[in-house]
Image (spheres, helix red, strand yellow):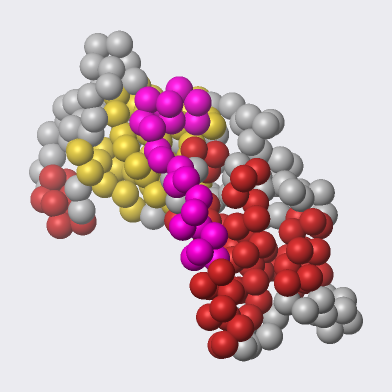
């Protein structure tokens, strides 16, 4: 199902307002809100990415792509310690680890926005691999197709109707409640996608960083998953 078809179905389900009353741009916006909500709420492998990078002895902070917003796991990718995970820590522990830290093999990491900081600071070159959620590219052109499985495309329509009645098109609390009930009923009958870790690591999309240490990152954009403007 492409964006044009999604927009048409939303329009039909909200009493088919004319494009004069509700231009396509508004329904496109509702569809995109629903799309990103679904992508974030469920464990779709299609919106998980894998990234490998090498550390150096002059930095312990590395930039991630701006569309990546939740790191799921970090582990070593080199042959000596492949698969060993780094433990995530919060700000308070990170500050303690950062105080007077002596360089060594990293055992922990903290996230600061779109940057990952390793503790202790690397004393050598290490290959690190991480898996994270990324924000799917916005649907813009009529022919754009969501990255989610086809069986979940109707969910964008259903949740898009809720966004429409919740104020994206017309503010109607009663209609919004009915739309949310319909969406909840539909999702309750769907098999929920699960995040299989091994499958995710082997098949997830690899995306290069655009950060200032991009020379350390390796990855290729998959044409099956990313369209023009996806980064």
Left or right of 152? Residue 69 is left
Left or right of 65? Residue 226 is right
Q: Residue at x 24, y 11 (%)?
A: 80
Q: Position of residue 188 (x, y in %)?
A: 46, 57
Q: Position of residue 111 (x, y in %)?
A: 31, 49
Left or right of 177? Residue 69 is left
Depth order, front residue of 184/41: 184
Q: Residue at x 51, y 72 (%)?
A: 181
Q: Is residue 200 magenta?
A: yes
Quadrant where the C terminus lies? Answer: top right
Depth order, front residue of 14/148: 14
Q: Residue at x 74, y 49 (%)?
A: 1
Q: Position of residue 17 (x, y in %)?
A: 82, 80
- Kindly tell me whether residue 86 is visible in this rendering: yes
Q: Is residue 200 above or below residue 25?
A: above
Q: Is residue 31 magenta?
A: no
Q: Residue at x 51, y 64 (%)?
A: 185
Q: Is residue 7 above or below residue 50?
A: below
Q: Position of residue 29 (x, y in %)?
A: 69, 68
Q: Splitting the image into 4 quarters, where does residue 200 fall?
A: top left
Q: In this figure, what is the number of numbered marks?
A: 0
Depth order, front residue of 143/180: 180
- Kindly tell me whether residue 27 is visible in this rendering: no
Magenta part of the protein: which range?
183-204
The residue sitting at the top extreme is 79
């Amino acid at each position: 199902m492409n964006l044009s078809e999604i927009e048409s179905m939303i329009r039909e389900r909200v009493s088919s307002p004319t494009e004069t009353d509700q231009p396509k741009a508004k329904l496109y916006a509702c569809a995109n809100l629903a799309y990103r909500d679904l992508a974030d709420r469920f464990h779709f492998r299609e919106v998980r990415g894998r990234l490998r990078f090498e550390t150096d002895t002059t930095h312990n902070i590395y930039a991630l792509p701006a569309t990546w917003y939740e790191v799921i796991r970090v582990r070593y990718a080199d042959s000596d310690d492949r698969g060993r995970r780094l433990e995530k820590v919060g700000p308070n522990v990170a500050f303690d680890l950062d105080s007077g830290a002596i360089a060594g093999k990293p055992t922990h990491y903290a996230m600061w926005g779109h940057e990952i900081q390793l503790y202790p600071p690397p004393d050598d070159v290490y290959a690190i691999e991480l898996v994270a959620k990324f924000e799917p590219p916005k649907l813009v052109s009529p022919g754009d197709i969501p990255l989610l499985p086809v069986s979940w495309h109707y969910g964008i329509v259903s949740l898009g109707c809720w966004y429409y009645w919740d104020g994206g098109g017309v503010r109607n609390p009663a209609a919004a409640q009915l739309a949310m009930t319909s969406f909840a009923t539909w999702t309750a009958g769907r098999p929920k996608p699960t995040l299989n870790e091994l499958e995710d690591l082997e098949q997830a999309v690899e995306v290069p960083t655009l950060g200032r240490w991009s020379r350390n990152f390796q990855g290729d954009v998959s044409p099956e998953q990313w369209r023009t403007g996806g980064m």
